[in-house]
Image (tube, helix red, strand yellow):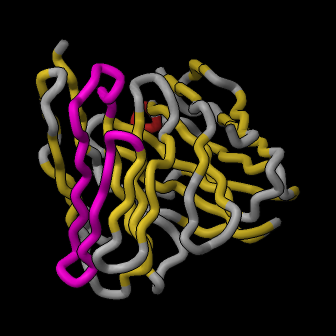
Amino acid sequence: DAGITQSPRHKVTETGTPVTLRCHQTENHRYMYWYRQDPGHGLRLIHYSYGVKDTDKGEVSDGYSVSRSKTEDFLLTLESATSSQTSVYFCAISETRDPKTQYFGPGTRLLVL
Amino acid sequence: ILNVEQSPQSLHVQEGDSTNFTCSFPSSNFYALHWYRWETAKSPEALFVMTLNGDEKKKGRISATLNTKEGYSYLYIKGSQPEDSATYLCAPLYSSASKIIFGSGTRLSIRP
């Protein structure tokens, strides 16, 4: 299994509070991704990174920001959490652009009350 | 936003039966197609990646075919077993984009 960890694994927070989720990899892969999983939507890309300090938006980026200061860490921040951001968040990594098989972390379950 | 469709959304199959389902995707600028298997309470795991028209990949009882000209892929499971119960995701990659788009998946349940 690819060495990918996510922290925390579970979090309950209140509306309006900031939340940061961490993805850590030991594979030295260049690409890292944040997805959210919601019923009826499958996996939707929030943001991704193609190198240290190089990030771009996915299809559902509003309300989220990311940072990648080191190859191994990709942080996802909810600046002011809303109930609509209650979801399961998955981090993924891939070594190269093509054909870019992704390896997924265990997921973080976030509940915003 | 690219439209990736998987059908059916859910499928119930008797143990021992064979089954198949479909992934449809835009064919323009197609580069590769991934299939992932996603068990409940776990993370998605890569099954296959295919790039060429007519590609066929096989892993045990599971196989997949690819038609890049018309933009579809089939996933086949022969002699379904309870451990095949999962959601199967397809995800095409395009040469004009730098990220994969996931379909919403086919949820397969095997009845013992």
Q: In this view, does A108 lie to the left or right of B63?
A: right
Residue A106: horizontal and vertical position, in percent? Answer: 60, 31
Q: Which residue is drawn at 48% across and 56% down?
A: A45
Q: Which residue is drawn at 30% across and 27% down?
A: B85
Q: Is residue B61 magenta?
A: yes
Residue A93: horizontal and vertical position, in percent? Answer: 65, 53
Q: Residue furthest top?
A: B112
Q: Residue furthest right?
A: A70
Q: Which residue is drawn at 38% across and 53% down?
A: B58
Q: Is residue A27 above or below residue B96?
A: above
First to last magenta residue range: B60-86
| Residue A101: quadrant of the picture | bottom right
| Residue B108: quadrant of the picture | top left
Which quadrant is the N terminus of chain A positioned in? Answer: top right
Q: Residue at x 45, y 33 (%)?
A: A87
Residue B17 seen in render:
yes
Q: In this view, does A19 lie to the left or right of B13?
A: right
Closer to the camera, B16 or B31?
B16
Q: Is residue A33 left or right of residue A53?
A: left
Residue A65: horizontal and vertical position, in percent? Answer: 64, 54
Residue B47: horizontal and vertical position, in percent? Answer: 45, 49
Q: In this view, does A25 lie to the left or right of A84?
A: right
Residue A112 seen in render:
no
Q: Is residue B27 above or below residue B1?
A: below
**Number of numbered discs present?**
0
